[in-house]
Image (tube, grey):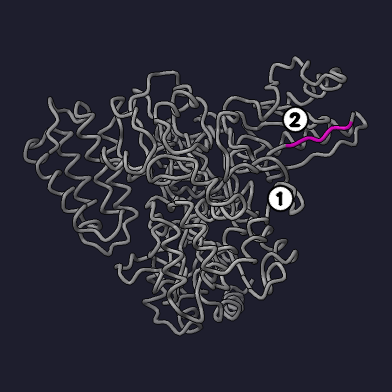
Amino acid sequence: MSMKFFVPQDTTALALGSNSVALTLALELEKRGLQDEIIRNGSRGMFWLEPLLEVEIGDSRLAFGPVTPSDVSSILDSLSSLGKSPNSTNHPLHLGEVEEIDYLARQQRLTFSRAGVGDPLCIKNYQSLAGFTGLAQAVKLESQEIVDQLKDSGLRGRGGAAFPAGIKWQTVLDTPNEQKYIVCNADEGDSGTFADRLLMEADPYQLIEGMAIAGLAVGANQGYIYLRSEYPVAHKILNQAIERATKAGFLGKNICNSSSDFFLEVRLGAGAYICGEETSLLESLEGKRGMVRAKPPLPAIEGLFGKPTVVNNVLTLGAAASILEKGSETYKDFGMGRSRGTLAVQLAGNVKRGGVIELAFGVTLREVVEGFGEGTYSGRPIRAIQMGGPLGAFLPESQWDTPLDYEAFAAIKAMIGHGGIVVFDDTVDMAAQARFAMEFCAVESCGKCTSCRIGATRGVEVIDRIVNNQDRDNNLILLTDLCDTMELGSLCAMGGMTPFPVRSALTYFAEDFGGESPREN
Amino acid sequence: MDKSANIEQLIEQFKTLPGGLMPLLHAIKSAVGYIPDGSVQQVAKGFNLSRAEVHGVISFYHDFNTNPVGQHTVQICRAEACQSMGSRQIEAHAKKSLGIEYGETTEDGRVTLQPVYCLGNCACSPSIRIDDDIHARVSAESFDQLMSELCVPATDNAGAKR
């Protein structure tokens, strides 16, 4: 029976040796005189199983993982002996049907439904999985109708700030100008996040489709993807995808035979975390230092080069494509309260089964970390969880039953942000983590606001003094005061939220700071 | 290679591109390996900016190093997910075994060591990047192994090691 092999080529799979697996597989097939095709797919996002080898036989798609080059030969042996009942293979790495693996089967994949299924650059594959149908819908609609669909869906920005995407699009649509822009924020800098990267590497056309839809919705003919330079694989894939989509008529002049144009370009960042902040990103795109701008004016009114600009995260634009494809009602049916649709949770750090988990809002942090993650990689107890990147709070066990919902997290002075969850075991030194939060802010501050630029450096010093028991009580008061100043006196979340991890470490893990009792607030 | 002529060509190529300064600086870096001090004046002239403005942009971004780097750039992720998996130890080990601090190059000119804040490989930490290849689940032993492989001409570099 003819077979098709799939070996992922996303960053994590490559970092775990998937190229060697593919190479060994090709040599082994040749040695056995087999002509079966090897497809380099994107990853499914089950990163603890990478490199995950999939084999398509008839209607079956079997998974094996994690595979090393030395496993390839025995996997082929087990396949050749299985004959007509694929599920009878008894190879120790055999995981059954890939889509029945519990980690994947328990997800509600909308944005990531195509990730890992096929060759991410194959347009035919994308179309066979309902790709570009959202765009085909959009070209038939008036701009206002597209914006209405987005508003009805309840989609909120997935970058971290959770601003209603439809309202942003409406503002740009309502601001008259000959030139408008769509900017995709692909500067995914938060530690513990990689969902944007996975979408760009495993399903780049979805982002392209979402951006073209945004262009039609607000009347913009030029888009930029601002990609962080730390993502060389995504960079290569996006450039190839744009070239192919342009050739196929989904980008460029008269997209999908309409009267509208949409040109798209990737621009690389240069290692500055702050450029994930939208106004800093716009400055950088203009070729300047990435200094944060004061708002107003909103970028929707005066954005890139002073023109009305939609700035959305990768997942927001990806979701826009699914919303146009499936309809706003379907999207809205997922979620809780004002958090509609699905959230791509990224489980990272010291965790046994890390990866991308797309779920409707409302599931608790504990369900994700214990149910999907199955505890720590080290096997030790979990002590702290940092949600929402380097500016997110550290949460102790008492907070893990909070449902993933923007408002519920805000209520405990934490944030969902871009959906990254970093797990720490009981060897973590929380005073060192609080110090690192300040240190990171000092390195990455754009320098515009004094409270952030200087506050972060002073923060490191004050934490050092507390840990060393130098004038402890007064320094604790000083640290609280400094956190207040940073929160109130900074234009953006960098200075404004660095206090979140610091305060939470001090509140919940006071024993690590060498004191007897928490002094925070 | 005549670096200054090369830079002139690049300036010509990017000066009419909207927001072309960042792509230009990336292009100079990949052609020369760093942003030479001498290019600031040329770039400023080409883009009709002051030298201070160009210097300001270069100095803002971590990627735009103004000194030559070694044959290979090794970046160690310092962000939280990698910390939770022992990156602080990897960091200390790397500095000790290479005998250099961040921003420095080994005496043989082979390796420049840099910090990086997140490579997006956080489910399989700790991570390092060697040129354009990212490596997952790095230990002190696998770090040494990777460094020793840098001494031989690279063949199938991408992810060939576990």
**Where's residue A347, x and y in %?**
47, 34
**Where's residue A41, x and y in %?**
70, 42
Judge whether residue A200 can be spotted in this image: yes
Q: Could you tell me which secondary element the residue under label 2 belongs to?
A: strand
Residue A192, image quadrant: top left
Q: Residue at x 51, y 60 (%)?
A: A184
Magenta residues, start to end: A2-6
Q: Quadrant of the C terminus of chain A?
A: top left
**Where's residue A439, x and y in %?**
29, 47
Judge whether residue A283 can be spotted in this image: no
Side (left or right) of A185 relative to A458: right
Classify mark 2: residues with Cα within 10 Å, few (<14), some (14-19) or many (20+). Answer: many
Nearer the observer, A372 or A402: A402
Label disc, if present, on residue A61 of the rendered structure: 2
Q: Relative to residue A170, is residue B121 depicted above or below?
A: above
Q: Residue at x 26, y 43 (%)?
A: A500
Residue A412, image quadrant: top left
Question: Most prominent secondary structure in the magenta stretch?
Answer: strand
Nearer the observer, B156 or A213: A213
Q: Quadrant of the N terminus of chain A?
A: top right
Letter of the chain that mark 2 sits on in the rendering? A
Letter of the chain that mark 1 sits on in the rendering? A
Given the image, on which type of amino acid does mark 2 rest?
Arg
Side (left or right) of A77 relative to A14: right
Are discs 2 and 1 located on one and the same chain? yes
- Circle 1 is placed at which residue position? A126
Side (left or right) of B140 relative to A56: left
